[in-house]
Amino acid sequence: MDIVDAIAALALRSLALAAGLVLVFGALQKLRDWPAFREAVAAYRLLPDPLVPTAAWVLPATEALAGAALLVDDLRIIGACAAMAVVGIATAAVAINVRRGRTDIDCGCGGLEGRQRLSWGLVARNAVLIAVLGVGIVVPGPRMNALGAATLVAATLAFVTLFIAVSQLVANRPFLVELRRQS
Amino acid sequence: MIEALVLSNSILWIVVIALLVVVFALARQIGVLYERVSPMGALMMDSGPKVGDSAPVFALSDLDGRPVNVGAPSPRSTLLFFVSPTCPVCKKLLPVVKSAAVSERRWLSIVLASDGEADEHRRFVQRAELGAFPYVLSQPLGIAFHVSKLPYAVLLDEHGVVRAKGLVNSREQLESLFTAKELGFASIQEFVAERD
């Protein structure tokens, strides 16, 4: 039974690590092309104009710090809470604009998927991410040997890649719908 | 026994990660394809003034109150570029438009067009550094050219005749309008039809 617990802890911890890495990379990408991100924030039309630049700084900065905290065992709880708040706010903003029918604006999510438009698929993806972050709160990092550590790294990498692949499919979907409608 | 399990497990991990990378790469390629495939050349939507027709004439004024005549005869051709502060593709294309304004300045002047609140557009002009272009706000103008999707461009020659028009998503599509004027074909679709 011990070994099952150990493996479960390892799997959950790798999920939390993967979420942390996804957040850190996403935030770095937003900061790298900051003017584009600022425009994306403005396009959501949720904040009065003077607040947009501040929000466009605070959001990715919090995201990066929260993601980094998730990677450290002792900080994982506060990191997970902050990350859930940031992703929750962003997801609410996406959901509001999908409800308004403004799906054509750019998500500004950062990521490798090219042009990510707003959709319910994106909301669902983020909901899964938030759930994973919640898991990060309850699970302490397992004590492990070298084999365990190697597995942790591999599983983390696998989850990150899985997230990127799913994001790409989510981004593709509006294009597919558009093409189907044309033909 | 344990060694064999460790070894096979390691191989499985490598394969799993490699497969995930492949899945992402395939999905990414499909994504790029989608972005390219949707309108080829500047897509013509068959409404509004036809290519070869005279454009309706509009006497407008830009954000700073200077008069801008659209559709009236002028020494240079006019590219009417319909934008909005909220359209992401517009932002991508504005640098292209700026560079075209320089490289084609011999024969072309560019007018940006939109509609909505002047204040919002003034801020947009400032942010995107569009001060060099006349920027007009007119809903009737967009309606007259049946602009339904942005960024939309209409190329008028010196006599105010529509030479090319369409939805533009990339540098290539914008340049296809210039080529269309040069060759006398209305759109890439017409060009392909003629050639076949």
Image (tube, grey):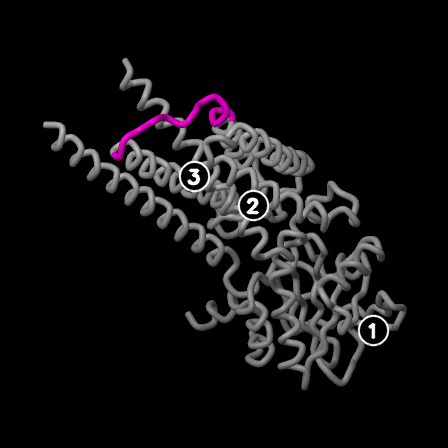
User: What's the residue type where badge 3 is placed?
Assistant: Phe
Q: CA distance from mark 2 to mark 1?
A: 41 Å
Specify whether disc 1 shares its chain with disc 3.
Answer: no
As drawn, the label of residue A34 is: none
Residue at the disc numbered 3: A163
Q: Is residue A142 magenta?
A: yes
Specify whether disc 3 shares its chain with disc 2.
Answer: yes
**Disc 2: host chain:** A
Residue at the disc numbered 1: B69
Residue B145: x and y in percent read 72, 61
Task: Give the residue at x 58% y 35%.
Answer: A87
Residue A71: x and y in percent read 46, 37
Apparent side of residue B171 relative to residue B113 in the rendered image (left or right): left
* A143 or B64: nearer the viewer: A143
Residue B113: x and y in percent read 75, 63
Q: Residue furthest right?
A: B65
Task: Give the residue at x 75% y 42%.
Answer: A47
